[in-house]
Image (cartoon, rainbow, N blue to C red):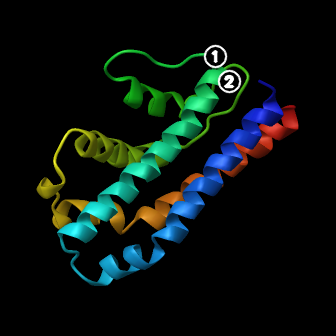
Amino acid sequence: MSLEKVISSIMFEIKQIDQLFESYKTLLNHCKENKPDLIELTALASVLHSFYNGIENIFLQIAKKIDCFVPQGKQWHRDLLLQMTKELEGRQRVISDELKLKLVEYLGFRHFYRHSYSFFLRWDELEKLVYPLTEVWIQLKSELNIFLDRLSEDS
């Protein structure tokens, strides 16, 4: 796959995540001011899960098409995230260590969401992810755009 196609694929995922935020803007804003009920918690959990899946789709594109290496084994999700903080031959680091620390929390929630029942969701746990979500996305998108700009320069 050409570098232009990789860039295009990453930009597509960025637009998808932007659409996720736009689609759930009302819910996200509502829950920042009101304690959500179970149905709203379940919807928020789905948004958080989709958010991290979108991020992981981007990271997988980079790992497969640029790094030519996707981590394997039980910890591959965590290893993939860590891989994005490394400068490798042929590319700069994708994200900062500071951002990685924030994303680890969303990765952890992704695991919980996929292996639990929604009635176990608790607002006091989810709010720690919901409140900073927009800011985390702004930071990630900024770092991704810097990465894409460097990638474009190299092509």
- Residue type at mark 1 is Cys
Rendered position, 44 above or below 66: below
Label 2 close to label 1 by CB (< 8 Å): yes
Please state, as top left, top right, bottom left or bottom right, where the C terminus lies in the image: top right
Side of 5 relative to 107 (left or right): right
Instruction: Pinpoint residue 37: horizontal percent, then vertical percent.
Output: 19, 74
Mark on residue 65? 2
Please tell me which residue is depicted at 18% across the width and 68% down the height of the picture: 38
Few, some or many residues within 10 Å of mark 1 (<14, 14–19, 20+): few
Q: Which residue is mark 1?
A: 68
Residue 114 appears in which quarter of the rendering? top left
The location of residue 11, given as percent across then percent down, is 70, 48
**Image point 45% across, 43% down: which residue?**
53
Left or right: 117 as drawn, with respect to 42: left
Q: Position of residue 149 (x, y in %)?
A: 78, 45
Q: Is residue 93 left or right of residue 99?
A: right
Q: Residues within 10 Å of mark 2 (few under 14, many from 20)?
A: some
Query: Going by the picture, which residue comes out furthest to the left?
Result: 120
